[in-house]
Structure formats: structure tokens, C-alpha cells
């Protein structure tokens, strides 16, 4: 069943015509724009932000930084582009990351084809002409052959707490934190949310605020970050590994430089403990992404590793019953949710000027004029409220646009019933709509984003090139091709314990969202191989005309 556009509606005339519209000017959008221009296509990119960077433009909150090593969170298609930039730390912060994005943009000369402060609001497919009409909030109506989404996996913030407009103090969402910062000294500050973003904010502003109150619902497994400053010698050392990294990273399970090295069954309990301790001390995501892969399949293995991490957390929380109960997970396994890296986060809660409020069983009822009120009527007086309440992951960026495919079908309506794509690269019923960082492809969960986004944009670029070389104009998944990919995705996901959890990985944080593991969990290298095989076989899961 599809939802048709209203009858007797005539599209206004286009204001410009291009070969491709790219939605977004972040990591994926910049590279996609560059590749399509290299083909000689007329391309226009649009971004609601004021400049390039995508998530690294919007997320300017205190403490925002990589949790992928900087030297792997990079483009690998150009050796000089890689080597002419030097990171100052292993896990650089947002200001440095934003400067890197500007460096890439200017080095490739991309600015002239990007329109900022412009939000795409409507995209209608004209079946008679085989082209899209893309509307913006600035009055643009662009006639384009290809509409390519590089909007990002985590770019549609959730704003679902009642009363945000009633607060008389300062209230900000983490995803739109002012670049100039907030004045917190001497003020009563409340932070809502203890996911990866909330953790970075909390550990950064504790001590700056007059008093900090943290409202915590879902506890998170955390790993301590070790973030050394790089000398020139360190920078030259990682740059010397360019060829190795380019050959290795795209084929690992998670798109990081490291991969699972140990087999649980081959180790004694003592050896397992030693391995866990060694990779825990690495101060990276290695315990999650290069420890024992069996933890994603075996409840028994998961529990042992989860208890190892819980024990580390309990020690740092000094076994305080309230802190342990609120902050240490017990009802899901380590690694089945997003694992944040942190630096002194747990120790924050030992400060006298920090309060931790458990809202798991006493949720926030509303924001009032003067603070936050819980369901039992308890009221916390605040001067500043920072909301780190998450995103409508995977689908949200596109369902907030009125996208209409063949026969007026609505993407928002279809994904509201069932979240389906073909390899996360396209959607049946929407010819020439090509996508990155949408459901059923590796992205955000268990994936170094630049690795995955480079691969997805390269596949799209080659698909467009092949289409044009054959004198064809449209590419669209077949219904059978989409069914086959969804079935494969579900088969892979159901073999793991990850779908048994409740998290944004499955859209559980968005009321009414269809439940499905949003990211492909079969491995970055495996996904790349399947995409390559699809192209090499002549795109059998697609109709090309």
C-alpha cells in the first residue's frame, strides 16, 4: 500500500537543473560531491548547517571528540590529502575535526557547489521524465536526475520532552549547542541523558558549573580513553602506515585498524582475563571491537565480558550503591549498545557539587519554567538545561523530508510501517534515490563511519558511472532484490544477541518506530564484498533503464 500525493497538484517550475543533488556536506557528502564532479556531472550539495562538517558542525558541545583514532577517521582515496594533515592527538576534539573538514573542502575546491543554511523539504519523483524535483526552504526547486542522501545516521535529534518552551532559563540540545559556549559558572545546570554525548558533556562541565545535576535513565558500559598528544615523530609514524591502513581498514569487521584476534574456546579462563585486561588498558574501543567476537553470539561469553567491565566500573564508583545502581548496566550485555569512551566520567559523581538522579523508574514528567519535574512531583530548580536525548537514527533525516517516489508513495509512510532498503543504498519504489548511512547498511553501530561512508559513496559513484556508460538513465531496486537483502539482514542479525536489547540500535528510543536492527551487523568487510559482487554481476537486484 502506498500513500499518493494529492490529485490535481501541479509542480511549480524548477529554478535550476543539475545531474545530481547531494543532501549533506559532512564526511559522506563532501566525498560524494567530489566523486561525481570528477565524472563531469553537474552537482549541487545542500546543507542546513552554516558550513561544512555535518555532525562535526552541529555537535559543538563541550567534550565532543572522536572515539575513532584520528588517523583512521580519514579519507583514504588520496595519499597526499591524508599525509598533508596532522592530528594533534589520538582522539582529536571537535574544533580540530571541524578544521580538518575545512581543509578537505578547500583542498578539493568543493565550496562553489555547496549551498549552506538551506534545508531540503520536499523531493518528488516525476515518473514521466525520470527525474526528481527537489525543493528547499529557501525557495529553490532543483530538477535533478539523481537525488543522493548523505544526511547521516545520527542527524535527526529527538525533541520529545514536554515543556521545553516553558523554561525561563537557558535550554539547549546537544546537537545545536552554541559555538560560543554557555556561561555555566555559578549556575545550577541539569544534563538529561547519559549516552555517549551526555557522557562527554558531563565530564567536561563538572567543576565549571556551580552545581551539576545529571538525570540518568539507561546505564551505559563505558571504557576509559587514553588520549596521548602526538609529537611530530608520532604523526610521521602513522602517516608511514598509509598503504597498510588503506589495504587493511576497509576489510576488517568494523572498519577500524584492529580486528578480532582471539577465539574464546582456545583460551583458559586465566588467559581470557589477561587478554581482557590488556585490551582494556589500551584506552580505545579495542575491547569492544577486537576482543572476543563470541560475545555477540553467546550469552555466556557476553556475561563474562560484561561482568569484567562492570567490575572495573564498580571499582571506580567506589562501590557506592546509588551510583552503581544508576550507572552500571545489568540487563543487557556489553557491546550490544553503543560503547562510549570517556575520560574521568565516573569520577565526576564523587564530587560534592554533582548530583545523580535516577529517572529509570521515576521519569521526567516535564520541564517547567524553573527546572525539571519528575513523575512523582519532585522538582529540581535549574538555571541551565542541556538535553542530550538522542536521535531518530537511520531513518529520521529522510522521514522529516516529504519524499515521494513512484505513484506518489511516501518514504516516511513506508518506513513508518516497515524499515526496508536494498543494501542501505537504495529503496524499491524510488528510482535514482541513492543513499548512505541509512538502515540495513553498516553505519554508526559497529562501524568506523569514514570507512563505511567512503565505501558507500564509492559504490554509488560507480553505479552512476556504469549506468551512464550503458546509456541508461534510472536505477531502482527490484522488489525481489529488496526482499532478499532484508531477509539476509534479518538472518545475520538474528544469529547475534544484539537484537534482544532495547536501544537506538533498534529504534527503541522513538515511540512507534518499527523494530529492526538499523545497522548491518555482518561485518564491514563482508558488506563491501557483497556490494562489489552485486556490481560485478551487473546489478541483478536492480532494474536499470
Image (cartoon, rainbow, N blue to C red):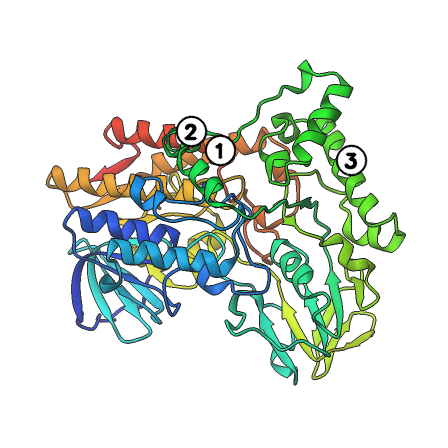
Which residue is rendered at x = 31% and y = 57% of the image? 105
198 w.r.t. 169: above or below:
above
Q: Which of marks 3 and 2 is nearer the N terminus?
A: 2
- Taking depth in this image into account, of 147 and 118 the one nearest to the observer is 118
Verify CB contact (< 8 Å) between mark 3 and mark 2. no
Task: Please state the horizontal and vertical placement of residue 201, each as a whole percent of the image.
Answer: 64, 62
Residue at the spot x=80%, y=54% of the render?
A: 326
Q: Nearer the viewer, mark 3 or mark 2?
A: 2
Q: CA separation, marks 3 and 2? A: 32 Å
Regarding residue 162, the answer to whether it shows in the image is: yes
Of badges 3 and 1, nearer the viewer stands 1
| Residue 386 shown left or right of residue 434 in the figure | right
The kind of secondary structure element at disc 3 is: helix
Question: At numbered mark 1, what does the secondary structure look like: helix, strand or loop?
Answer: loop
Among the 4 quarters of the image, the one containing residue 109: bottom left
Q: Which of marks 1 and 2 is nearer the N terminus?
A: 2
**Does the rendering let one see residue 55?**
no
> Dot 1 corresponds to which residue?
257
The numbered mark at residue 517 is: none
Q: Which mark is residue 248?
A: 2
Considering only vertical position in the picture, is 257 above or below 261? below
Q: Find disc 3 in the rendering and name its residue.
A: 307
Q: Position of residue 499 (x, y in %)?
A: 61, 39
User: Left or right of 291: which side holds 462?
Assistant: left
Left or right: 389, with 7 as reference point: right
Instruction: Residue 252: give x, y in percent of width and height.
Output: 47, 29
User: 305 or 463, which is in the foreground?
Assistant: 305
Q: Do the residues labelled 1 and 2 touch (CB within 8 Å)?
A: yes
Q: Do the residues labelled 3 and 1 touch (CB within 8 Å)?
A: no
Q: Name the residue nearer the viewer: 499 or 148.
A: 148
Amino acid at each position: 500500500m502506498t500513500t499518493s500525493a494529492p490529485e490535481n497538484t501541479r509542480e511549480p517550475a524548477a529554478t535550476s537543473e543539475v545531474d545530481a543533488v547531494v543532501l549533506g556536506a559532512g564526511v559522506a557528502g563532501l566525498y560524494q560531491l567530489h566523486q561525481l564532479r570528477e565524472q563531469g556531472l553537474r552537482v549541487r550539495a545542500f546543507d542546513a548547517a552554516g558550513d561544512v562538517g555535518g555532525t562535526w558542525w552541529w555537535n559543538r558541545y563541550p567534550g565532543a571528540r572522536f572515539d575513532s583514532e584520528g588517523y583512521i577517521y580519514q579519507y583514504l582515496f588520496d595519499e597526499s590529502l591524508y599525509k598533508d594533515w596532522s592530528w594533534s592527538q589520538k582522539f582529536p576534539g571537535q574544533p580540530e575535526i571541524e578544521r580538518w573538514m575545512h581543509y578537505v573542502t578547500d583542498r578539493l575546491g568543493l565550496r562553489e557547489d555547496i549551498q549552506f543554511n538551506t534545508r531540503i523539504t520536499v523531493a518528488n519523483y516525476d515518473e514521466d521524465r525520470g527525474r526528481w524535483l527537489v525543493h528547499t526552504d529557501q525557495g529553490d526547486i532543483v530538477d535533478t536526475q539523481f537525488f543522493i542522501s548523505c544526511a547521516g545516521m545520527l542527524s535527526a535529534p529527538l525533541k520529545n520532552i514536554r515543556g521545553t518552551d516553558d523554561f525561563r532559563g537557558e535550554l539547549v540540545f546537544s546537537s545545536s549547542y552554541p559555538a560560543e559556549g554557555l556561561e555555566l559558572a555559578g549556575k545550577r545546570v541539569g544534563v538529561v541523558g547519559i549516552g555517549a554525548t551526555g557522557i562527554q558533556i558531563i565530564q567536561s562541565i563538572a567543576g565549571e558549573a556551580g552545581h551539576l545535576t545529571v538525570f540518568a535513565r539507561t546505564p551505559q558500559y563505558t571504557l576509559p580513553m587514553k588520549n596521548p598528544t602526538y609529537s611530530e615523530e608520532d604523526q610521521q609514524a602513522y602517516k608511514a602506515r598509509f598503504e597498510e591502513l588503506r589495504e587493511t581498514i576497509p576489510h576488517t569487521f568494523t572498519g577500524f585498524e584492529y580486528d578480532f584476534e582471539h577465539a574464546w574456546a582456545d583460551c583458559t579462563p586465566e588467559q581470557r582475563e589477561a587478554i581482557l585486561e590488556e585490551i582494556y588498558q589500551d584506552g580505545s574501543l579495542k575491547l569492544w571491537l577486537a576482543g572476543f567476537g563470541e560475545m555477540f553470539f553467546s550469552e555466556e561469553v557476553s556475561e563474562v565480558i560484561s561482568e569484567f567491565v562492570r567490575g572495573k566500573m564498580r571499582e571506580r564508583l567506589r562501590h557506592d550503591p546509588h551510583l552503581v545502581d544508576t550507572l552500571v548496566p545489568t540487563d543487557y550485555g556489553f557491546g550490544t549498545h553503543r560503547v562510549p569512551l570517556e575520560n574521568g566520567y565516573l569520577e565526576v559523581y564523587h564530587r560534592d557539587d554533582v548530583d545523580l538522579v535516577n529517572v529509570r523508574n521515576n521519569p521526567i514528567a516535564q520541564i517547567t519554567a524553573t527546572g525539571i519535574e519528575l513523575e512523582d512531583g519532585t522538582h529540581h530548580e535549574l538555571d541551565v538545561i542541556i538535553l542530550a536525548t538522542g536521535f531518530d537514527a537511520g531513518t529520521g533525516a529522510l522521514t522529516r523530508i516529504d519524499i515521494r517516489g513512484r505513484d506518489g508513495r511516501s518514504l516516511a509512510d513506508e518506513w513508518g510501517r516497515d524499515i526496508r532498503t536494498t543494501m542501505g543504498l537504495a529503496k524499491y519504489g524510488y528510482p535514482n534515490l541513492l543513499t548512505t548511512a541509512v538502515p540495513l547498511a553498516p553505519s554508526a553501530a559497529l562501524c568506523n563511519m569514514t570507512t563505511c561512508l567512503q565505501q558507500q559513496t564509492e559504490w554509488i559513484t560507480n553505479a552512476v558511472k556504469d549506468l551512464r556508460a550503458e546509456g541508461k538513465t534510472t536505477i531502482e531496486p527490484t522488489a525481489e532484490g529488496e526482499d532478499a537483502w532484508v531477509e539476509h539482514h534479518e538472518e545475520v542479525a538474528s544469529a547475534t544477541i544484539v537484537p534482544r536489547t532495547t536501544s537506538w540500535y533498534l529504534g527503541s528510543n522513538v515511540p512507534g518506530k518499527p523494530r529492526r536492527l538499523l545497522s548491518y551487523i555482518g561485518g564491514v568487510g563482508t558488506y563491501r564484498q557483497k556490494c562489489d559482487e552485486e556490481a560485478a554481476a551487473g546489478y541483478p537486484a536492480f532494474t536499470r533503464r
